[in-house]
Image (cartoon, coloured by chain):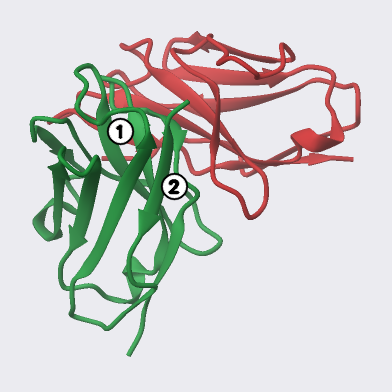
Amino acid sequence: QSALTQPPSVSGSPGQSVTISCTGGSSDIGTYQRVSWYQQPSGTAPRLVIYEVTNRPSGVPHRFSGSKSGNTASLTISGLQPEDEGDYYCSSYSSGGTSHVLFGGGTKLTVL
Amino acid sequence: QVQLQESGPGLVKPSETLSLTCTVSVGSINVGGFYWGWIRQPPGGGLEWIGNIDYSGNTYYNPSLESRVTISVDTSKNQFSLKVNSVTAADTATYYCARTGWELLPDFWGQGTLVTVSS
């Protein structure tokens, strides 16, 4: 199965907004509301920041938001903070063949 | 809040079997509606899903790894385990265990353990 496609890097200044895209296909993002986003600061384990496309777990700041259009999901971080810097990964449930999980290749966010 | 901890050897020889255990220390593994999974990340690389299991032993595997991977569960110890056979240097990675929903996507993660394949 193919991985989901993310841009390798994005950047923004404190206070600005950035959006990270995640493109899949009709067997995953295009059909299911089962997309998660993870934040991974350097040297730490991933942390869930968005689940089921748009939902934030308890404790995740409101500046993190998710959306989906067609085969592409997006993560938007508004009002960038220095602590938002790190790698971000999308993930989706997929029914292509047997049920399985796809991850994106990851996007490195730099806060300038 | 669920807590998970990986354990196992940090060094495995090529062609041998990598074995890891995940202990769920807060919360019960014997609960319907959740799966328990393994994900790995090579040094400097991205995340790769390995597979999931539920408390009754139902499994889902990454098709690209399925021929070498076995995931099992021991509800009496609140643990689940991963075995990867015939390892090569390409299996060198940080291995994470995680809890997932029915859709197999992780929500709570362990801290990860680095496994190096080298002679």
Q: Would you place residue B11 above or below residue A55 in this image?
A: below
Label 1 sits on what residue type?
Answer: Val
Tell me the element at label 2.
loop
The chain coloured green in the image: B
> Tag 1: Cα neighbours inside 10 Å, few (<14), some, or many (≥20)?
many
- Name the residue type under label 2: Leu
Q: Which residue is located at x 85 percent, y 36 percent?
A: A82
Q: CA distance from mark 1 to mark 2?
A: 11 Å
Which sits in the foreground, B86 or B30?
B30
- Measuring from the top left, give residue A2's x and y in whole percent: 32, 40
The colour with which the image depicts chain A is: red
Q: Given the current orientation, which residue lies at the most extreme bottom position?
A: B119
Q: Measuring 26% from the left and 40% from the top, which residue is drawn there?
A: A1
Residue at the spot of label 2: B47
Residue B39 location, x and y as percent?
36, 47
Kindly identify which chain the residue marked by label 1 belongs to.
A
Write down the quadrant of residue A65 in the picture. top right
* Residue B109 image offset from top left, x and y in percent: 45, 39
Q: What chain does mark 2 sit on?
A: B
Residues indicated by labels 1 and 2 sit on the same polypeptide chain: no
Q: Is residue A37 left or right of residue B26?
A: right
Q: Which residue is mark 1?
A: A101
Left or right for B14, reference A85: left
Q: Residue at x 19, y 18 (%)?
A: B32
Q: Is residue A45 above or below residue A98?
A: below
